[in-house]
Amino acid sequence: MKLLRALSKHPLAITGLVILLGFLVVTMLAPLLTPHDPLQQHLRARLLPPFWLPGGTLEYPLGTDQLGRDLLSRIIQGSRVAVLVAFGATTLVILVGTTVGLLSGFFGGLLDTATMRVVDVIISVPDIILYLTIIALAGPSLTLVIVVIGLVGWTTLARVVRSEVLTLRRREYVEAARALGQAELTSAFRQVLPNVLGTVVAIATLKASSVIIAESTLSYLGFGVQPPTITWGQLLAQGQQYVATAWWLSTFPGLAITLLSLSLIFLGNWLRDLFDPRSNG
């Protein structure tokens, strides 16, 4: 109830939550919501505009592409990949970033020095370069995209968690657990980890938005999930050459990417402020 009261005071967070829930419902019910087979070609209906423009029809509410495929159905189908990659990669970010940051901050010493140097090396290279290099060597696939984005994107979370753990490890309740003979590793996970989970959730939510953009970028460049699997990045790339004559082909997929990313940013900013110890709330 306390969380709901806090949420009710932030209209942007509520907006983000509503949009996010809407996308999740669309993703889960995609086979039922798509008005047409997203792969079915209808060349006689190619490049139809959205229904509210001259020449448009409610049969294809958002228009059709250069092969007569229903754009709405393709966007709905593409949402499944976006949500799957965001969930999978963000889960990896949480697991790796939280574990590395927790152990590095709690034990310190050589472990801390070594892990932070690894973090520095990864951060020094632009993410997109790492993505493209690894995927080009291994070959694009849905699983690889999730793993690569997740294993490249954990560094920020690890640094933040480490910073908090450095303070928490000297708290009285941690020292008391040590005095009672609790193992160091057990203390790290039982005494310290629960106190950083709020920060982890906030950062992970913000990270999920960048994951969606990263996946769309890779698909746009041809290094992401390959056809016939549909992604929003693919739709953007395919509609690029028709921007002047069929603007809807790239506008609506771009709008979907923007809305889903913004919903996560709104929620992430609210969660960050909510769990920030310096905030008044």
Image (cartoon, rainbow, N blue to C red):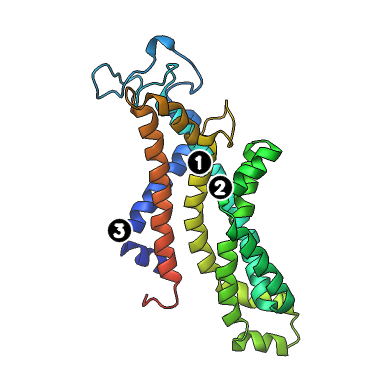
User: Do the residues under discs 2 and 3 have CB atoms within 8 angstroms?
Assistant: no
Residue at (59% x, 47% y) in the render: 129
Give the CA separation, mark 3 to mark 1.
30 Å
Check disc 2 and give the amino acid type. Answer: Ile
Q: Is residue 205 visible from the viewing direction of this image?
A: yes
Q: Earlier in the sequence, mark 2 or mark 3?
A: 3
Residue shown at the point (66%, 89%) measured from the top left? 176
Q: Is residue 168 above or below residue 9?
A: below
The quadrant of the picture occupied by the C terminus is bottom left
Q: Are marks 3 and 1 in contact (CB under 8 Å)?
A: no
Q: Is residue 217 above or below residue 240?
A: below
Q: Which residue is mark 2?
A: 128
* Sequence-wise first label, 3 or 1: 3
Structural distance between the alpha carbons of marks 2 and 3? 33 Å
Circles 1 and 2 in contact, beta carbons < 8 Å: yes
Q: Residue at x 62, y 58 (%)?
A: 122
The amino acid type found where label 3 is placed reads Pro
